[in-house]
Every structure is written in structure tokens, then in C-alpha cells.
Amino acid sequence: MSHKAVIFDMYETLITFYRSPLYFSENIAADCGLSRAEFKSFWDKTEDDRTLGKVTFEEVIEDILRSTGRYSDELLKLISEKRQRSKYEAFKTIDPEVKELLKELKDRKVKIALITNCFHEERTAIRDSDIFKCFDAACLSCELGVMKPNEKIFKDCLKKLNLKPEECLYGGDGGSSELEAASALGMKALQATWYFKDNTRDHVHLKKDFATLLRPMDVIRFL
């Protein structure tokens, strides 16, 4: 059957963090004057709450700085601005073929949607990006209070598209068990690998149970 929509993951699928200056936990820790281990003892346990929109980046950093006796308004502002800037910078390095793919899908009248696990500071950059206007539906975890692989975020997206699972392709790098979740609902799940070479953290690997996309335009042959 022909597919009426392609639902994409955002990070390491449509864009990558690894072609622009990083501002991850080790970088933030250094600005806080903390070892990475000490910083992460606070930071890591907030990840789900940040992803679900229960707490903002600024609130977490303020708590860490106060808890370690390092708080100042100036330091909180510096760290918050550097974090926000890094999120915007990632959108300047999109693979040109990703933009070509989005245009081709639009030309073919195929709907385009987004499901992404993201934090408050990422939401702002996503909504301000040039590609956001391409989406017919967007489900951001920090806005909905639900994240992948929970089936609810996938069902919310399908409802916005007014489509059945079997009418949709899902493309993502494979993090957060997203491919398994999409497939379980009846979507054709595809693993996007074109940014793998950029990802220095190597947190995802090829999954043999799913079709592999070596380049963005490979999506077209599955329509």
C-alpha cells in the first residue's frame, strides 16, 4: 500500500548535534566549576522530568548551583544562554538532503510529522527552525508530558494526522526504542543512519529487524 505520511524523529534523524559546538553535561559541569561526576550526580536524575516538561533547564541548573554553593545570577544566565545557543546552532548544520527530502514529500502531497523527546530549551529552537513549517503535526514530549516509547505520543500524532498506523512510515535513528514502539502500533519503521558517522557517542547501533536508510532520500522508495 502507499503511505500517506512520514513521521520523523528529530535529533540524529533530521538534525544532529555533532556538526556544531556541543554543550553537553561535561561542558556545563566545567562552567559550574564541578567535576563531570559530581555534576552528573545531580543532572542525570532529572532527565525524565526535563523530557516530560516537569522542570526547565534553568531550574535544574539553579538547583545544582545553589546545592554546591556556586550560584550567581550571572553564572546561571551564562550557562542558560550557552545551552540555548547550542540548540539553535544544530539547526544550521542540517544535511542538505534532509531538506531535499522534506521538499520532495511536500511535492508528493505526503504528510510530514514529528515525534520527538525534547527539553524546554530544545522546544524553542525546534519551533523557531526553518523546517518546523514543514510539519503537518508535531508532538513534543515536553509539551505533551509523555515521551517515546510510550505509545500515547504515537497515537496522539496519528490522531493529529487523522491516519491509521499502517498508512504511516516512521523514520528515526533508533534511540528510545522508538522503532520498536512504532512497529508495534503497525507503522513501517525505518532506521535513519545518515548521521551515525557524526555521532561521537555511539549510543545507537544498526538494528537488523528494521530497514536501513543510508541517506535521507532512501525514504522515498518506501512510500
Image: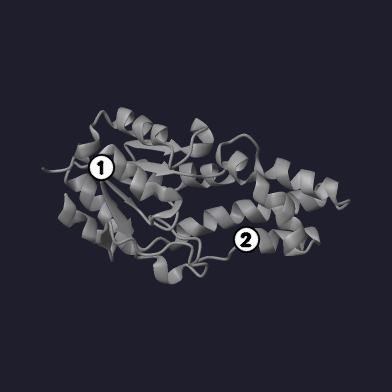
Which element carries disc 1, helix, strand or loop?
Answer: loop
Classify 221 as above or below 152: below
Residue for badge 2: 23
Crowd around label 2: few <14 · some 14–19 · many ≥20 (10 Å): some
In x, y percent, where is residue 145? Answer: 52, 32
Mark 2 or mark 1, earlier in chain: 2
Crowd around label 1: few <14 · some 14–19 · many ≥20 (10 Å): many
Q: Amino acid at mark 2?
A: Tyr
Q: Amino acid at mark 1?
A: Met
Q: Quadrant of residue 132?
A: top left
From the viewer's perspective, tell me whether residue 103 is left or right of residue 116.
Answer: left
Classify 172 as above or below 136: below
* Residue 178, visible in the rendered structure: yes
In x, y percent, where is residue 41? Answer: 73, 54
Q: Residue at x 23, y 32 (%)?
A: 164
Which element carries disc 2, helix, strand or loop?
Answer: loop
Q: Residue at x 79, y 53 (%)?
A: 75
In x, y percent, where is residue 146? Answer: 49, 34
**Of residues 219 and 189, which is closer to you in this image?**
189
Classify 184 as above or below 21: above
Q: Which mark is residue 187?
A: 1
From the viewer's perspective, tell me whether residue 24 is left or right of residue 41.
Answer: left
Q: Quadrant of residue 14?
A: bottom left
